Amino acid sequence: MDDNREIVIMVDDDITNLTIARNILSESHKVLTAPSGEKLFQLLGKVTPALILLDIEMPDMDGYKVMEELKKNEETAYIPVIFLTSKIGPESELKGLDLGAVDYITKPFSRNLLLKRINMHILFEKQRIELLKHNLSLESEIDKKAKTVIELQNAILRTISELVERRDNVTGGHIERTQKYLSLLIGFLLEHDVYAEELASWDINLLIMSSQLHDVGKISIRDAILMKPGQLTEREFLEMKKHASYGVDIIKSVASQTTESEFLRYAEILAGSHHEKWDGTGYPNNLQGEDIPLQGRLMALIDVYDALTNERPYKNAFTHDISVEIIKNESGFHFDPVIVDVFIKHEKDFLKG
């Protein structure tokens, strides 16, 4: 006898039907019998069958009630159930199928028909399980590939950002620090319920990652200007200011070649608006007040804070306290006063950061 035979449980209060079913199925299946729903659940505590043959008309707990109980338990909910009954009629059959039965066979049943139906539904269940396993495996593989793509994307972004930093002859770490400051500032705004509704609509992790590209337009600025030790002339500064527009153009060019949208949308906003000023005297579009995207207003403050507190070719680093005072004095001029208020309340956290 094949020890790998599938287990089939026959549930019927009629001993004759149980005997007939056992005789029909025992050659190809391991048959267990239960004279009631209660005995079935006792068996299910010990074994998991490939299929259940379930009589409808039984005392105490009929087949419909047994079916309802099977479906309530996640360990038994997916076991295929075929109703066996002498009840004939579409209403009875429909009720059984609605409860989750996979088939409905009337008594007295044909040996060949019973075997064919049982084997067919056991095969269907095996295929369902295999498909589920395949889908889970596929999802896992997709997740791995997606993670790899994200890691590659981050590596490319980091390389581009570092390239910009090196060309700018700026003290290293600007990108990393501004990401950290941006994350802190957004967290404090949420803590104080400032611009909370708009912030809640963002993918903040994606925004912070995209902030690496806020100065990408500097790639298009000539070395003689970008790496000049000392103050720029007025003409040179006008050329330098173009990096914001260049950044937008670069990001738009990338966006035109990909279906990815949100990450590049954030990057474009940051690149194009982080030099705008609250009073309208910034660049490249002289936007004023809340016409400046909130992302740009946030980036403007933390970008300036980092520039003030670190050495540049044209200046020494200012202390944290002096930098905070400069930002405070620029509230309502360079910076959104609401954002400055939150920054001032937590300025010591930026010093730690």
Image: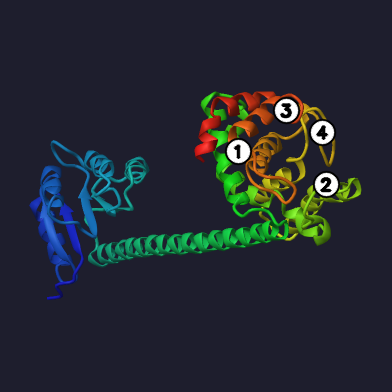
Residue under numbered circle 4: 287
Name the element at disc 2.
Answer: helix
Q: Is residue 329 left or right of residue 342?
A: right
Question: Which three-letter amino acid code belongs to the residue tagged 2?
Answer: Lys
Task: Tell me the distance, in whole angstroms, between the alpha carbons under discs 1 and 3.
Answer: 27 Å
Question: Looking at the picture, how far across and down is residue 347, in whole percent?
Answer: 56, 30
Question: Which three-letter amino acid code belongs to the residue tagged 3?
Answer: Glu
Question: Looking at the picture, how far across and down is residue 180, in whole percent?
Answer: 55, 43
Question: Which three-letter amino acid code belongs to the residue tagged 4?
Answer: Leu
Task: Tell me the distance, in whole angstroms, between the alpha carbons under discs 4 and 3.
Answer: 16 Å
Task: Tell me the distance, in whole angstroms, between the alpha carbons under discs 1 and 2.
Answer: 28 Å
| Residue located 59% across and 26% down the image | 344
Compared with 295, 195 (above or below) is above
Which residue occupies the foreground of this view, 340 or 93?
A: 340
Instruction: Please name which of the two marks, 2 or 4, marks the residue nearer to the observer.
Output: 2
Residue under numbered circle 1: 202
User: Quadrant of the image for the N terminus?
Assistant: bottom left
| Dot placed on the residue nearer the N-terminal end, 2 or 3 | 2
Compared with 132, 334 (above or below) is above
| Dot placed on the residue nearer the N-terminal end, 2 or 4 | 2
Residue under numbered circle 2: 241
Q: Which mark is residue 258?
A: none
Question: Looking at the picture, how far across and down is residue 105, in whole percent?
Answer: 28, 54
Task: Tell me the distance, in whole angstroms, between the alpha carbons under discs 2 and 4.
Answer: 15 Å
Name the element at disc 3.
Answer: loop
| Residue located 21% across and 56% down the image | 108
Name the element at disc 4.
Answer: loop
| Residue located 59% across and 31% down the image | 321
